[in-house]
Amino acid sequence: MISANSVHATLNGSCALVKVEGNASIIEVGSAQKIVTTGAGSIVRYASGQPRVLNKGGGGVITQGGSATP
């Protein structure tokens, strides 16, 4: 879980769950089974896989891409 505002974090490798709480962060993920966001304006990019996505925040983006290593 990442609980912060305005951070840039990279999570290399595979994660079962990535949960992002907070606002205006950029998170790079290698791969994940599930990605959950709360808060507003965060961007989460995953390098590979097809995670289940739950975007509870306003204006957040979850998309494939980024620089993390799967």
Image (tube, helix red, strand yellow):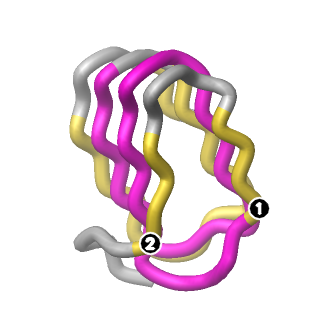
| Residue 25, image x, y percentages | 31, 31
Look at 42% across and 50% down and name the residue there. 44
Classify residue 20 as left or right of residue 65: right
How busy is the neighbourhood of tag 2: few (under 14 within 10 Å), some, or many (20 plus)? some
Residue 43 against residue 22 in the figure, above or below: below
14 vs 56, left or right, is left
Instruction: Count residues near mark 1 (Cα–Cα under 10 Å), then give few for <14, some for 14-19, many for 20+.
Output: few
In magenta, the rendered stretch is 24-51
Q: Residue 52 carries which label?
A: 1
**Residue at point 38%, 17% (across, down):** 23
Q: Are marks 1 and 2 in contact (CB under 8 Å)?
A: no
The image quadrant that residue 31 belongs to is bottom right
Disc 2 target residue? 64
Q: Which of marks 1 and 2 is nearer the N terminus?
A: 1
CA gap, disc 1 to disc 2? 12 Å
Q: In which quarter of the image is the N terminus?
A: top right
Look at the image and say whether residue 23 sits in the magenta stretch.
no
